[in-house]
């Protein structure tokens, strides 16, 4: 798998590995004999269905324009990555944009690859978070999600399916958080891996 994300991404590698090794994802990557988007790996004769995993959004609420958010990063298996690389010379070759996640989704869509249906856990908790843990804990639909009110709540408008709130929003096995910078990144790492000073416990 190839995972891309920015320098303000906090990735919980252990949780990510468990998710990729889950029966769900293993089954999803197995190709049928009549699947036209499959590729054969060089080290394994088993065909692989392209997988494009991440926090699925519907651009402007349009479910024909699904993309995986670049904020929390997205992952491509080998089959999907090969198709993306093959599409690059012909798919927005001169585009200059900060919306690389939307462009990647468009290129993959042209190759017949779409964001994986649902990366939520069995309880409906999100694995890939486009904001910090604190934002997701306190967010309520209509709070803004980066805007100034319910009409500007892009997070609600772009979300697909039920959007849980509070402690139920994030999966216990969360994979990634976005906008985690500097001191927050160090603090999260210390809390998660038991590196806090006794004064902070």
Image (cartoon, grey):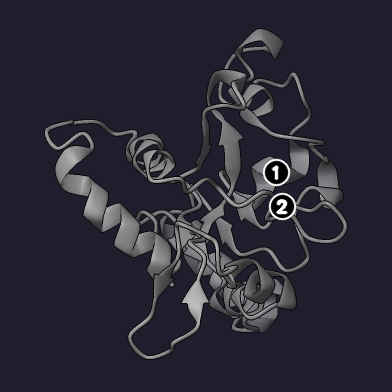
Residue 136: image tag: 1
Q: CA distance from mark 2 to mark 1?
A: 10 Å
Residue 122, by quadrant, is: bottom right
According to the image, label 2 marks what residue?
126
Disc 1: CA contacts within 10 A as few (<14), some (14-19) or many (>=20): many
What residue sits 73% from the left and 77% below the top?
23
Q: Report whether residue 32 is seen.
A: yes
Residue 115, relative to residue 28: is it above or below?
above
Task: Classify mark 2: helix, strand or loop.
Answer: loop
Residue 51 x/y as whole percent:
52, 61
Which of the two discs, 2 and 1, sits closer to the camera? 2
Check contact, mark 2 vs mark 1: CB within 8 A. yes
The quarter of the picture where the C terminus appears is bottom right
What residue sits 41% from the left and 60% below the top?
80
What residue sits 47% from the left and 61% below the top?
75
The quarter of the picture where the N terminus appears is bottom left
Residue 106, relative to residue 123: is it above or below?
above
Front residue of 63/140: it is 63
| Residue at the farthest bottom position | 43
| Residue at the farthest left position | 94
Residue 172 x/y as whole percent:
78, 66
Residue 26, by quadrant, is: bottom right
Residue 67, relative to residue 38: is it above or below?
above
Residue 106 x/y as whole percent:
38, 36
What residue sits 11% from the left and 33% below the top?
94
* First reached walking from the N terminus: tag 2 or tag 1: 2
């Amino acid at each position: 798998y190839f995972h891309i994300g920015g320098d303000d991404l906090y990735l919980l590698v252990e949780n990510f590995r468990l998710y990729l090794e889950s029966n769900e994802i293993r089954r999803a990557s197995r190709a049928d004999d009549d699947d036209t988007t499959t590729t054969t790996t060089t080290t394994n004769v088993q065909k692989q269905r392209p997988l494009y995993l991440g926090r699925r959004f519907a651009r402007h609420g349009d479910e024909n324009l699904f993309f995986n958010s670049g904020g929390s990063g997205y992952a491509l298996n080998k089959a999907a990555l090969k198709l993306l690389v093959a599409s690059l010379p012909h798919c927005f070759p001169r585009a200059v944009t900060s919306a690389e996640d939307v462009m990647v989704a468009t290129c993959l869509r042209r190759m017949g690859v779409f964001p994986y249906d649902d990366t939520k856990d069995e309880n409906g908790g999100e694995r890939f978070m486009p904001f910090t843990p604190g934002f997701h804990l306190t967010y309520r639909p209509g709070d803004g999600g980066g805007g100034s009110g319910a009409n500007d709540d892009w997070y609600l408008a772009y979300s697909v399916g039920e959007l849980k709130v509070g402690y139920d929003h994030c999966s216990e096995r969360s994979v990634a958080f976005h906008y985690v910078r500097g001191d927050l990144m160090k603090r999260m790492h210390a809390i998660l891996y038991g590196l806090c000073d006794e004064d902070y416990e």
